Amino acid sequence: MASSFSVFSIEVFLVILSCVSKSSEDSLPELSPQKYFSTLQPGKASLAYFCQADSPGTSIFLEELKKAIRPLQDYGISVAKVNCIKEEISRYCGKDDLMKAYLFRGNVLLREFPTDALFDVNAIVAHVLFALLFNEVKYITTLEDLQNIENSMKGRANMIFSYVRAIGTPEHRAVMEAAFVYGTTYQFALTTEIALLESIGSENIEREHLYFFHCEIVLDLSQDCRRTLMEQPFTTLNIHVFVRTMKAPLLTEVAEDPQHVTTDHLQLGLPLLFIVSQQATYDADRRTAEWIAWRLLGKAGVLLILRDSLEGNIPQRINVILKRAEQEMEYLVLDDIDSLIFHVENNVKSEQMEEGEDEEMESQDLDTQDDEVAETVYRDRKKQLPLELTVELTEETFDATVMNSDSIVLFYADWHAVSMAFLQSYVNVAVKLKGTSTMLLTRINCADWSNVCSKQNVTAFPAVKMYKEGENPVSYAGMLGTEDLLKFIQLNRISYPVNIASIQEAEKYLSGKLYEDLFTYASVSVLGLFSPAMTTAKEKFLEARNYLKGHVIIGIYSEADVWILSSKYAAPLPALLLARPKEGKIECIPLAGTHVHGIVQIMARAVLEIFPEITVENLPAYLRLQKPLLILFSNGSISHQYRKAILTLVKQKRLDSLTPCWLNLKNTPVGRGVLKSYFGSLPPLPQLLLVNVYSGGQVFAFPSDQSITEYNLVSWLKNLEAGLENPIKNLSAQEWKPPLPAYDFLSMMDAAEPQHPTKKVPTCVKETDKQESEKGEQEPEPTRKEPVQTLRIKYWNRNYWSKEAEKPFRHEKEL
Amino acid sequence: MGCRGSGLLAAPHRDYCVLGAGPAGLQMAAFLQRAGRDYAVFERASAPGSFFTRYPRHRKLISINKQYTGKANAEFNLRHDWNSLLSHDPQLLFRHYSRAYFPDAGDMVRYLGDFARRLGLHVLYNTTITHVTLDKDPQAWNGHRFVLTDHKGQVYQCSVLLVATGLSVPTLIDFPGSEHVEGYESVSVDPEDFVGQSVLILGRGNSAFETAENIMGVTNFIHMLSRSRVRLSWSTHYVGDVRAINNGLLDTYQLKSLDGLLEADLKDLALVKDSKGKFHVTLKFFLGETNASWSADSVRLPEDDSDNFAMRVGYDRVIRCLGWKFNFSIFDQSLRLSSENEFNKKYPLIKASYESKGSRGLFVLGTASHSVDYRKSAGGFIHGFRYTVRAVHRLLEHRHHGVTWPTTEHPITQLTSSIIRRVNEASGLYQMFSVLADIILLKENATTFEHLEEFPMQMLAQLEPLTGRTAQHGLFVISMEYGKNFSGPGKDVFFYERSVGHTEDAWLSNFLHPVIYYYKQLPTEQEVRFRSPHWPLPRPTAIHHIVEDFLTDWTAPVGHILPLRRFLENCLDTDLRNFYAESCFRFALTRQKLPPFCQQGYLQMQGLAITESLQQHGVESKLLQNYAAATENSSQRTSDRALAPGPRAQSLDSDKEEL
């Protein structure tokens, strides 16, 4: 309980300090020779650096050795510094300046290393693994050696041959790390002889090479093993990915919708290529597909799919489908194989250029933030916001403040990323309103004052509420940004609805002169017209207004002479007049019998324009119409000619089934991202597109060789309707899945507790889990695991091994 | 029968009867009062909390009363306020009654008095219930009524009986010579009475140590004798074990200052008096021969055989500090409150829902209900049972008044923060670790969820009937736990590297930390009953540990929130990331489906706008792209990618057109 924390806090604190320093740099156990040898365990490898007790505590070598502790622990190898002291004579303690590192397995010496061979962490790891994997990785120097191994592998197993420029390089380490995982599955051969590389006909011999020799399928000894060259940069992860793709079947036949097909390739970030075949041409297609599969081995997965097995999902002419993780499917027409392969290869490369340049493991690291809001807020945490412009409330001050002044309250939690992102916009509003508004901007941290927040019915952060004297608090339901909130506050300066007192005032209101300054925030004003007797209609109207506070300017006129307005605007009472002063238009909507919800909808629609400029802020409002978008992408404002063409068609009611709109890339630069996703790169502008977000997710482009005229537009739309146009893009219908796996603590717990009663509750245990835990029982020293779950197992190993390896040393320390 | 029946008809009836106006009884009364229920509390004494008027004998409460935590959050502060009861009146917090970290018992009496008075609780003082029995009545809520008779013979009928009488009977021990033993409840508390004496204390709990502490300075020596080895609270995490505040004697024992601890089974013991009036310890076994006169001079003593026997000296006084038992005597056999099992002589037999196993409608509250989490959690103490009483009240509200267990409903995008908020502030989860848990009930398609607070974990299988909520679409259970192998008597809880810092090692956390269980389906009663030992719940579909935190502040974005989000995402098979409006905009136009955050925020016109400085950080972190700046680069790139020159020329044309 808490007592243990408080009473012993000092001690706890000290230990935590030491943990912190430990995690930043692993400490190197320092032992005397005798103690060191007493810690060695049979079968366990250990690297020890022997040096004189009085030699300097730090050196470049020791620094590198420390860095190697963690990676070596991952392979179950402990590291120690042994201080040679006079009292204990050991044959490993050489002369003063001839100190060496020794590798033991159990207490058997495997190899000694002069410290200059272990020049950095890569060299240390590479050398140590090289020594341990002596049998798994054959070092060869001549073509003859290579051929001997190759011959011995034929019909038995595949082999991996690599050339590195020198022993101890990062590339050498990468090969050795791969060999640690795959050494039992494949024969590894390694050379540093450039001549050998040359003699097997390699190009670009100045760089490292790794070949996969497909020997297992070779039955005729006179035949050479087929080779696949790894083209990716020489990193551990790339080798891992490469070997995994080699393991995958060359060609897979599927009968499902490509949408739902996934293989290892997708997980590894490689594309899938579906060759669409049909019964009639199946054999030929299969040969073609196999040939393509060989060419794309290691770069893409190739699958064969029968068109007849699908229900007409694939457009007729399409015979190849390219699918990439997190991206839309690409439908292609295959004319010649070379151009197809070129297309796929280029795709792979560009993807790697975009994502692959970071540290290899990093992209898979579960501890790397992939939430853009959380990450940006975290990175911005040290920025000083001008928070003093907003009043911070507490439980004591809350009630008095919201009762005594018109105030806006932001409810937030200081640990909540979305709240803190919005707090910045909120402060911006305060900056903009500084000294001009009668509205008090306040905020309350619900992490401190949770009682206040729950009393105000705030269950989710962030929330904004407006408190005005004599009125119920109004929740702000707009976009969490400066502009929208500012608009909300400004439009709420007047109280709603505006009670219009005379016909003259009504006219002024409709022409936008009554609240001229507010029209910078709203483009529409609404006037409800009711005869004095229409009380229920008025009530409905007043209720609807509550939903729209701060979005539209709302007025009401209900005097006896309302008939004058009614007849002037041909509005049978009760009615709404929608005025757009900027356009000089007044529209009339009869209200008889409309429900509250209906009125809200009418008013919400009133805000929509006929041919709007689409922005990040207003897109959702137009998406609600659930019609395909006809978007004109433009870099800057659009020409009068286009506008006229579209507006004419709107008037002729030819665009009723669509939402015509345009997008200015200068105001909405993210539009470029949208276009790139449609076209692969930025197309010529302006570009007219039909985006059918809701049904089918198809995107059609207006032919770029035609000019956008009424006539051309109409005939294009007719073609579309008739199904004569091909989409340039099918929007991915993929669900949003977890971006990365989670730590599987259940399996870790099972693994740590081999007697765990998995048998008792067999239904809950997945087959894979079971295998894993059984394996754990059989091999308490998991030196080699199936590579499939490397990442996960690696996490597990790290703490398993580190605990195991540290135990003896910890003992020593305590003594 | 008929006669008795008519007598009963006249007897006053209450929906709820609470026995005892101690902390638990008053706590229940406060909830019943607020819910507007028909109830009465029966109290033997003339004021609430009579136990505290006498106990603890040395007047110092060992429940902490922390005035300052550095935090304003009232719920969080209750984690370090172990004496307050729950109410809506901020004046009724214990810190207004005492400033002492370990307050005086008198302050507790004053506090309880105020609590009952300020809230206007219906307590019948000076009413001793002498007998409780059952009367079958098919019309009654539970098929029977509880019939209470007080010392004046007045009869009361109750639909539900809430027993909050605490543990009031001192545990006695019977061995030859036990008549020489003084009891904790009556022994002198004046150190003057012990000057120059040698004292033997039987028992090894807080009362034994408290007694020793008081007289340590003036005695020749104190020996403590009990069957089990000493259990120290800080090594067991159990507040009922010996608290550091009382363990001065351990110091003097370990430093060889004449005081000492010994282990032996008290039942085998015998005490004999020698001619000088000193008491000698011997074994019952040795007495067999000389049954007639038990005098130390004639009886065989252990030191006769082994001359270095530890307790070979004579004692001036022997004091018994063996704790208390539940008073079963007023309850009729038909209530089936007790069982013959040894453990159940201390506590009445109840289920994890605090309802008696023997009679439906009878609940045991407070200290007497501690059998549910004995030596595990805090259910026997105010800071624990104030929450279990609330749980019982919620069960009753649903069972008898159709009020479903309170929940809040949220969109799934709030799931991570909903959990983070509770593990950081909730006091009930923190005090009643491994006993009460928050439950997240997923709704169909997992787009929304209900958050249900502080449900008794062991009753998980019966969640639906007990709460009136449905759990058809999967659920999360959020509890707080200590590491499985961390604590226990005799374990070194200060071992090196006891704290875990890496997120991937979170499951090895030793200190109290949040654990989240995910079940695709509600576990069955069988599964709960036959769960593996050391597991508070049956095997879940998946489990998550939030790594322990020195400050018990689980809000670190990468250390705590990110792994939790990944866990929830993988359970729900969805993407729970937050996105700025611009990203949602791009998804809305380039994909048919949107992530939940965009669906529930952006598409509802509540997107999250980005500010300039955040945008900059986003671009630096490569999580966001700067589309405005990308203009030039990308046009270069397009030409690099060798697009046909046609469209390029055309794009120039169209620009012209625009001009």
Image: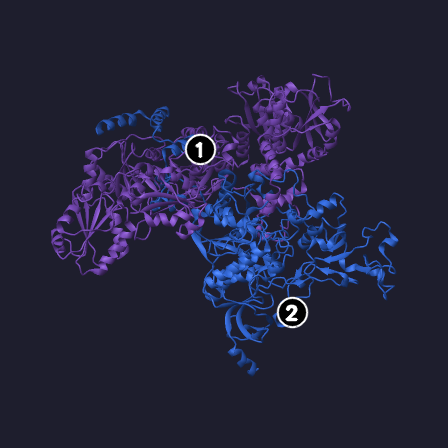
> B404 or B297, which is in the foreground?
B297
Given the image, on which type of amino acid does mark 1 rest?
Answer: Lys
- x 69%, y 16%: residue: A97
Residue A463 vs residue B323, the one in the foreground? B323
The picture quadrant where one finds residue B301 is: bottom right
- What distance separates the C-alpha of mark 2 from that of mark 1? 66 Å
The percent coordinates of residue B572 (x first, y second) are: 48, 47
Instruction: Judge whether A250 appears above or below A543 on screen.
Output: above
Q: Which residue is mark 2?
A: B329
Which x, y percent locates residue A131? 66, 26
Look at the picture and state if A137 lies above or below A771: above
Would you say B178 lies left or right of A780 here? right
- Which of discs 2 and 1 lies nearer the camera? The answer is 2
**Mark 2 element type:** loop
Mark 1 closeness class: few <14, some 14–19, many ≥20 residues within 10 Å? few
Q: Which mark is residue A382?
A: 1
Q: What is the residue that sits farthest to the front in this orientation?
A: B192
SS for callout 1: loop
Report whether A423 appears left or right of A201. left
- Chain identity for the colour purple used in the image: A
User: Can the viewer see residue A749 in this picture?
Assistant: yes
Is residue A383 toward the left or the right of residue B248 in the image?
A: left
Instruction: Provide the chain ID for the residue under circle 2.
Output: B
Q: Vertical placement of A127 versus B381: above or below?
A: above
Chain B appears what colour? Answer: blue
Q: Is residue B526 above or below residue B626?
A: below
